[in-house]
Image (tube, coloured by chain):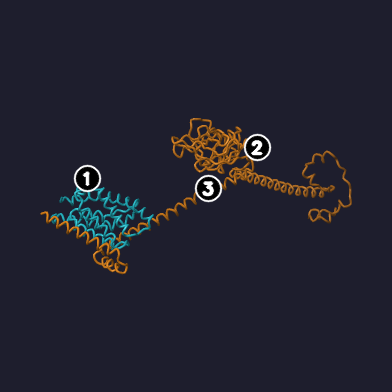
Amino acid sequence: MNWTGAVRTMLVCAILIVLHYTLRPLLAWRASIDFLIVALLLGSVRLRPGAAAVYGFLLGLVADSIAVSPFGAAALAMSIVGFGASWLKAVFFADNLALNGFFLFLAKWIFDLIFLIVGHRAVDPELAMQIFVWSPLAAAVTAVAGVIALSLLKPLMEVRTA
Amino acid sequence: MATAARYGSRVDAGLLVGCVVLSLIAVVLKDEDREPVASALRRSIVAPLVGLQRGAERWRSAWVASEQRQLASDSVAIRAIKEQALQVENEQLRKIVGLGSRLEWGFIPAEAVHSAAPSEDVVTNMTLTAGSVAGVQRYNPVVAPEGLVGVVQTADPTMSVAILYTSPDFRASAMSADAGAFGIVYPHTGRGSAAYMLELRGVSTRVQLKPGTQVYTSGLGGTFPRGIAIGSVVSELKTTEPWTRTYLLRPAVSPSRVTTVLVLTAQRVTQGTGNVWGGAVNADSATRRIVAANDSIARQAALIEAQARRAALDSVRRATIDSVRRSLGAVVTPVTPESTTVRAPAAASTTPRTPVQRRDTTRARRDSTRPDTTRKSPT
């Protein structure tokens, strides 16, 4: 990835991170859009798996420091998701929006699974409800929003590396 | 090349393991140990994002508060509208109760359900929630506190259908408030608001009704009893009929506002309703009575004045006759009012009377103060 591509990717990730902390609180949906996951995947597929894990770790730390959630849970989940996204970058770079959407859905759901299990934030019935109802819903919403965001930001990201 | 790739994979795995280990350490840290780290992050790198999130949450809370205020004001407005509707309904029910108490008997209360077809511009009929079981019959008049609404067209056991005065089939024999003009009320053929107006046709040309004149049912025809308010005269309509006049009437009842009505029974129609709607009739009749009373008082006054004048003339005449007779030496006969009022000079002339010499006739009367009598006494 050349410098131009890196700068563009950083810009798009910054936009997504800003959206996460502005649009998400404004909408305040029960199953909310996770723009951090979109930003994580977008950056991870352009990095090596190790670097993607570090990127995810840093993003997770940012999320943990602002949220009330147990500190470190998001960092752990994003490290794993970032590493996996970088490892499966061939899938994410397919020119198929549905596949990209499914990839986003899967990433968000895995993130929630790790985050909820590690965080122990809920008792068992609520945890099951969160994992099997709200997390898939949030993952679906994130996937749709991610696909739309990728489509809108495509002109900024024409330089792609395989 | 393969070594480099293997080295790279090991580095990646090492980084992942390092991140995972660090994350797990952060997770297992106690609150007092991890809070400084989180706080330091919030104050330094993450500070702009915290500011953004705070601003967004502030916007969100302001939006929610505004929405709640809007909801609150909407609910207040809805309550006010409901209260207004309740007041109107209460007013109508009070009027219906008042009408029922004035009628006392011979009516069936019913709720009116408007049943205008979508293709109809004008509401011409309404469904009533009382039927033949309650005593409703065909051609029973339907009335409201303001006046005539229509007439029952069909009466089912539990409900009935009434045609309104807007129906083309509606007719009512009508009269003016002073019963000086009679005619037949028809629905006015017009569009928009004019479609709810009425026409009073067949009024004699010698009678001219002023705008605002109240029109009531005349009781002729037997369908409607006398005295139900129909409306008031708006203006005269120009027609081709030379011998009759036609007037445009504004109905007393607005069909859209009618929610509760009274159906007058046939017996009540036969026996009449009296002056239940007759505020104007009463006023007119009272005016006529006052005028008539004034006339009679004037007549009485004139009579009394004439009588007084006649009495004065009679007394003058009596005094003159008395003095003349005394001056001629005739016998002064007391003159009774009857003799003064009834002229009897002829009778007096026909019956000759012999003058009777009396002692007191030659003397002046002591009780008289008239100068002519005192002067002529020593003869």
In the rendered view, tell whether residue B117 sits above or below residue A57: above
Which quarter of the picture shows residue B129? top right
* Colour cyan maps to chain: A
Choose the circle earlier in sequence order: 2 or 3: 3
| Circle 3 residues within 10 Å: few <14, some 14–19, many ≥20 | some
Q: CA distance from mark 2 to mark 1?
A: 90 Å
Horizontal side, residue A32 vs residue A91: left or right: right
Regarding residue A71, the answer to whether it shows in the image is yes
Q: Nearer the viewer, mark 2 or mark 1?
A: 1
Q: Nearer the viewer, mark 3 or mark 1?
A: 1
Specify the label residue B262 is tagged with: none
Up-down: is B41 above or below B256?
below
Taking the spot 51% from the left edge, 30% from the top edge, the residue there is: B242
Q: Residue B252, how many percent across, how many down?
A: 53, 42
- Same chain under badges 3 and 1? The reply is no
Q: Position of residue B266 (x, y in %)?
A: 62, 35
Around disc 1, counting alpha carbons within 10 Å, would you say few (fewer than 14), some (14 to 19), or many (20 or more)?
few
Q: Which chain is disc 1 placed on?
A: A
Query: Tag 2: residue type?
Result: Gln
Q: Residue A56: x and y, percent? A: 23, 58
Disc 3/disc 1 C-alpha distance (Å): 65 Å
Say whether mark 1 and mark 2 are on the same chain: no
For label 1, the residue is: A96
**Residue A136, how many percent across, how many down?**
32, 50
Q: Element at badge 3?
A: helix
Q: Amino acid at mark 1?
A: Asn
The residue at the far left in this view is B1
Assess disc 2: are there few (<14), some (14-19) or many (≥20) residues with their C-alpha within 10 Å of its C-alpha. few
Q: Amino acid at mark 3?
A: Glu
Q: CA distance from mark 2 to mark 3?
A: 31 Å
Residue that label 3 marks: B89
> Mark 2 sits on what residue?
B271
